[in-house]
Image: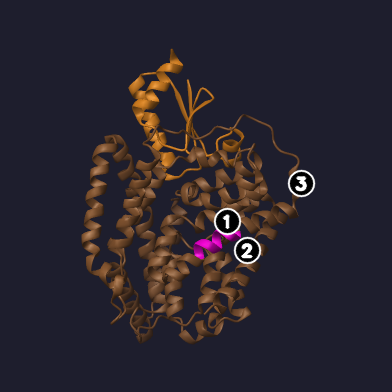
Chain colours: A brown, B orange
Amino acid sequence: MSERAKLAVMLGVFATFWFLPVGSERFFEAVRASLSLAKWYAQEHVLLCLVPAFFIAGAIAVFVSQGAVIRYLGPGAKKRFAYPVAAVSGVILAVCSCTVLPLFASIHKRGAGLGPAIAFLYSGPAINVLAIILTARILGPELGIARAVGAIAFAVVIGLAMHLAFRHEEAAREAAAALVLPDDRPARALWQDALYFASLVGILVFANWGAPRDGDGGWWGAVHGLRWVITGALALGLAAMLLRWFERDELAGWVDASWGFAKQIMPLLLGGVLVAGFLLGGPASGERGVIPEAWIAQAVGGNSLSANFVASFVGAFMYFATLTEVPILEGLLRSGMGKGPALALLLAGPALSLPNMLVIRSVLGNRKTAVFIVLVITLSTIAGVIFGALP
Amino acid sequence: MRIEVLGSGCAKCQRLYAEAERAVAEAGVAADLVKVEDVPSIVARGVMLTPALAVDGRIVSSGRVPSASEIAGWLREAAA
């Protein structure tokens, strides 16, 4: 940090305290709501949901063959495979946000072309495992599934639309050094890897198995009663697999990658939760934030076209640090946002933000970037209206 | 010998740089270690997944962080 920047920070902190509304009841209410929300997250979500999720993300980063995916996005790729593979590849490839841009640029310039590159760019941030798991856990399985399905479908549609809109410019392609496929390491048999991932996902699912709604026993309640037995059995199975099938340095790499995700995401998430609580209120009714609920209900309540458009538009320009869209959206839903606009924001939000528009512009130029943004906002609005109209 | 670490500056790229530094010491070769962070030049080299490592212009790994001893092996090979 330069000395000038330090001075600016110091003046900023000073000004914050100068204007701090210490006497205001509303301010303290919002601070209380913010702390109360952070406490609620700590008690409800962190250990059972996020810890297995970090290990799954780490396992994908270390053990899934990236070369197999990249092959479908390279220069010789068949179009009908390139689009769907690009749309779902975010699960495997976008585990580190800084790899997205070089990969996007090379798919566009050297690989399968503009359409698949856009499909990857759009779906990458939206369908990574951590985002989907956290969305499903906190906002409910309905929105979690809608988000995953919507993101994949949108990626294909937006990619195809971009390809059609700019197909005449696509002919000239750079010819340069041959593409380098990422390294593949020899691994276990496919069924062994499948079993390993299945036990990880199983632990995540059963450890978080919710209590049945009152009186509603049946198999759901039976599973709830047995969840620790099932989780324990899966954990034992996992331990046996780790001992027999994995080498020591592979396991070290896995723990390292999982820990990397935890370090990267936990501080962001805590910040997001505190900000969401301060602005939008805490988990209990009556814990108000600084933004009046009436404003939120007016802007994005219900399922009108304008509510969905506002949610898409704001989502597209606003920057959400990794996963912070989830607590913020949770606060908005509690303050009266409709579920249609919530989906619209989830579909337009993580893929776009003002800072990453500037970066995309540097690769694609003004016209393509503008078309991409308009497509994302329009489609998100439409999807929100449809999702909001579902029973 | 010229060793390049290609990547846009994320945590993994920094780890690869550190591993490469240790590998140079381990292999005991004279080498220039440089970072290539500019996206167009990474793309021009044909690298799809960062971080990547190049020894004397040849890409030896991509999409992962190899260990210092693995890198040292490549360095000795290139020096031989």
Q: State the separation of the CA atoms marked 2 and 3.
A: 21 Å
Q: State the separation of the CA atoms marked 1 and 3.
A: 21 Å
Q: Which mark is residue A376?
A: 2
Q: What residue span does the magenta drawing correspond to?
A: A147-154
Q: Answer yes or no: do the residues labelled 1 and 2 have beta carbons within 8 Å?
A: yes
Q: State the separation of the CA atoms marked 1 and 2.
A: 9 Å
Question: Depth check: A348 or B39 in front?
Answer: A348
The residue positioned 41% from the left and 71% from the top of the image is: A140
Q: In the figure, A176 relative to A168: above or below?
A: above
* Comes first in the chain, label 1 or label 2: 1
**Chain at numbered mark 3:** A
Residue A123: which quarter of the image?
bottom right
Q: In the figure, A354 relative to B36: above or below?
A: below
Q: In the figure, A334 relative to A327: above or below?
A: below
Residue that protrudes farthest toward the right in the picture? A168
How far from the left and from the top, in percent, is residue B76?
Answer: 40, 17
Q: Is residue A71 left or right of residue A327?
A: right
* Residue designated by label 3: A169
Residue that protrudes farthest toward the top in the picture? B80
- Give SS at disc 2: helix
* Residue designated by label 1: A122
* Comes first in the chain, label 2 or label 3: 3
Badge 2 local density, few (<14 within 10 Å), some, or many (20+)?
A: many
How far from the left and from the top, in percent, is residue A275?
Answer: 40, 70
Question: Depth check: B39 or A80 in front?
Answer: A80
Question: Depth check: A27 or A310 in front?
Answer: A310
Residue A244: which quarter of the image?
top left
